[in-house]
Amino acid sequence: MNVLHISVKAPAKINLTLDVLAKRPDGYHEVEMVMTTVDLADRVDLTLRADQDIRLECSASFVPDDSRNHAYKAAMILQERFNVEKGVSIYIDKQIPVSAGLAGGSSDGAATLRGLNKLWNLGLSLDQLALIGEEIGSDVPFCVYGGTALARGRGERLTPLVTPPSCWVVMAKPPIGVSTADVYGNLAVDQIQKHPSTNEMVRAIETQDFSMMCRSLGNVLEEVTLQRYPQVRQIKELMLSSGADGVLMSGSGPTVYALLQKEAKVHRIYNALRGFVKDVYVARLLGGAEVKVLA
Ligand code: ATP
């Protein structure tokens, strides 16, 4: 039976660590980071079209609806590369805040790759989809697999890790848009004050040691973003004083998240933050390689 419609879940990612090792001759940065998924997700609906058009609509009107959109780009690449004679209508139900350090756009691109693989009967493996994802953006390969991984290179060289100890994640995004390119551009790689211990984070995850995981959180991009946006620092401090077990900025920011094991603390932190910033999200750490495509 031919499938005509597919809905795909596109979860947000958070960085448990983000380290920058060097600036490369090609202009990119050599990174080392541990990433995991949370159950705050966009939904990507894909409907088969008889013509060859690619059409995109998003519930957030300010998100581009053309080839600048990672989901649109994913469809374009697959259609061209595999001579697909069908088109697709893409609808993105946006729940992940945009330009927030949560890789919403990358996750939409990855979800579109996974969904179209089914809708257009391409028969590609996840590894093949991840390779195509590299052409869209450095975080797309991770989003293709989901789960938890150590990422190196530009972020595309992945080593899968086991699911971290489960916990609550409270995310707060101050009302500022942060450009990833800008933050990397303002990072003096040879003057980084404190590199996170990626090895310790990997060990904490492997041994399911939640306290060690919280102690090992680290992101060198905080040095740039916290200095430029005092609000981000204030959110971190508020989370810590409200009893968070661990706190970190995700990606290039500005979203800051708190990890918590006890549900009772989640309400306390949520309420403390809501008085200060409008966009607060409560989610569970997903962290397991669950890739969902619903026909
Ligand atoms: P990352 O953590 O990967 O740097 P981010 O969370 O900081 O990502 P995104 O929300 O992915 O940022 O969006 C960054 C930019 O990408 C925005 O300027 C937006 O216009 C563009 N973009 C492309 N496709 C999408 C999409 N499907 N959803 C949201 N933004 C998108």
Image (cartoon, rainbow, N blue to C red):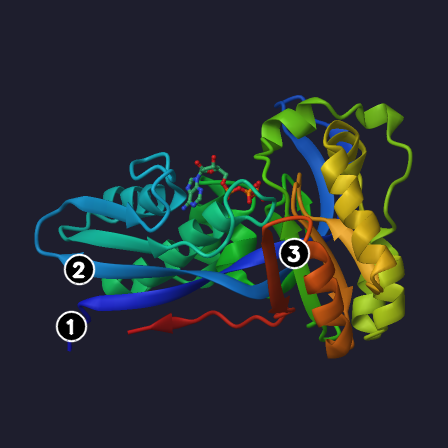
**Image check: 177 left or right of 91?**
right
Q: CA distance from mark 3 to mark 1?
A: 46 Å
Q: Are marks 2 and 1 in contact (CB under 8 Å)?
A: yes
Residue placed at 37% from the left, 34% from the top? 68
The residue pinned by badge 2 equals: 48
Are the residues at dot 3 and dot 1 in contact (C-beta closer than 8 Å)? Answer: no
Q: Callout 3: helix, strand or loop?
A: helix
Q: Which residue is mark 3?
A: 274
Q: Identify the residue under disc 1.
A: 2
Identify the residue at horizontal 67%, vertical 23% (top origin): 185
For label 1, the SS is loop
Residue at coordinates 49% horizontally, 58% vertically from top-left? 144
Q: Nearer the viewer, mark 2 or mark 1?
A: 2
Q: Position of residue 249 (x, y in %)?
A: 73, 47
The kind of residue on which mark 3 rests is Arg
Give the quadrant of residue 20.
top right
Looking at the image, residue 80 sits to the left or right of residue 253; the answer is: left
Residue 106 percent coordinates (x, y): 48, 47
How far is disc 2 from disc 3 in space, using C-alphas?
41 Å
Type of amino acid under label 1: Asn
192 or 284: nearer the viewer = 284
The reply to whether dot 2 and dot 3 touch (C-beta < 8 Å) is no
Query: 17 and 281: which one is in front?
Result: 281
Q: Is residue 74 visible?
A: yes
On the image, the x and y values in percent for residue 161 come to 70, 66
- Secondary element at image label 2: strand
- Going from N to C along the chain, the mark reached first, 2 or 3, is 2
Mark 2 crowdedness (10 Å alpha carbons): few <14, some 14-19, many ≥20: many
Q: Using residue 218 as the reference point, say whether residue 270 is left or right of it.
A: left
User: Earlier along the polypeptide chain: callout 3 or callout 1?
Assistant: 1
Q: Residue at x 80, y 62 (%)?
A: 202
